Amino acid sequence: MSRSISTQPAFAWWEPRTLRRHDKIIAGTNSRVRCFPHKYGIEVPRTIEEALRIERANSEKNCRKAIDKEMENLKVAFDILPVGSIPPPGYTLSSGHLVFASRYAEAAIQSVKDY
């Protein structure tokens, strides 16, 4: 095992059993983390492209406005480097992943309630 924790008394009792059950533990975790494409009957996008496709299909502008607002609010936390520049030491690449589930579905539910 990496970092030799199996030699320490606090870990020696559970380390062999846990390593034997490794595949079952991972499979159990993956089964709980499933992809649900709908929330409260509303399609929830996974990517920006998918969000814009849903928006075009529904003739709405809410999603684009929400993405622009989120990017504007996050801009202060990041130092965007010019293309081709060398990153500083300690630089960490960020994927820019957005989570649509909570706000997107709640906004749609609120619009239904307001109707």
Image: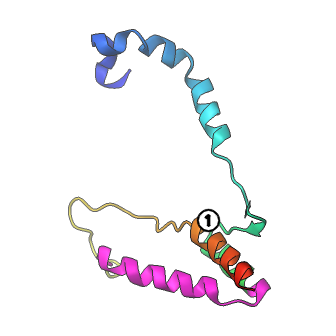
The answer to whether residue 78 is seen in the rendering is: no
Within the image, what quadrant is residue 8 found in? top left
The secondary structure making up most of the magenta span is helix
Q: How crowded is mark 1: few (under 14 residues within 10 Å), some or many (20 or more)?
A: some
Between 83 and 103, the one lying in front of the other is: 103
Is 31 located above or below residue 114 in the figure?
Answer: above
Decide whether residue 58 is among the magenta residues.
Answer: yes
Residue found at x 51% / y 66%: 97
Q: How is the image coloured?
A: rainbow
Q: With 17 as the anchor, is 74 left or right in this view?
A: left
Q: Residue furthest front?
A: 114
Q: With 36 as the anchor, is 92 left or right in this view?
A: left
Residue found at x 46% / y 11%: 16
Question: How many tags in the picture?
Answer: 1
In the rendered image, residue 31, in percent from the top left (x then y), is placed at 67, 38
Magenta highlight range: 56-80
Which amino acid is tagged 1?
Ala
Q: With 2 as the anchor, is 100 left or right in this view?
A: right
The answer to whether residue 75 is seen in the rendering is: yes
Between 115 and 31, the one lying in front of the other is: 115
Residue found at x 78% / y 65%: 41
Residue assigned mark 1? 101
In the rendered image, residue 59, in percent from the top left (x then y), is placed at 75, 90
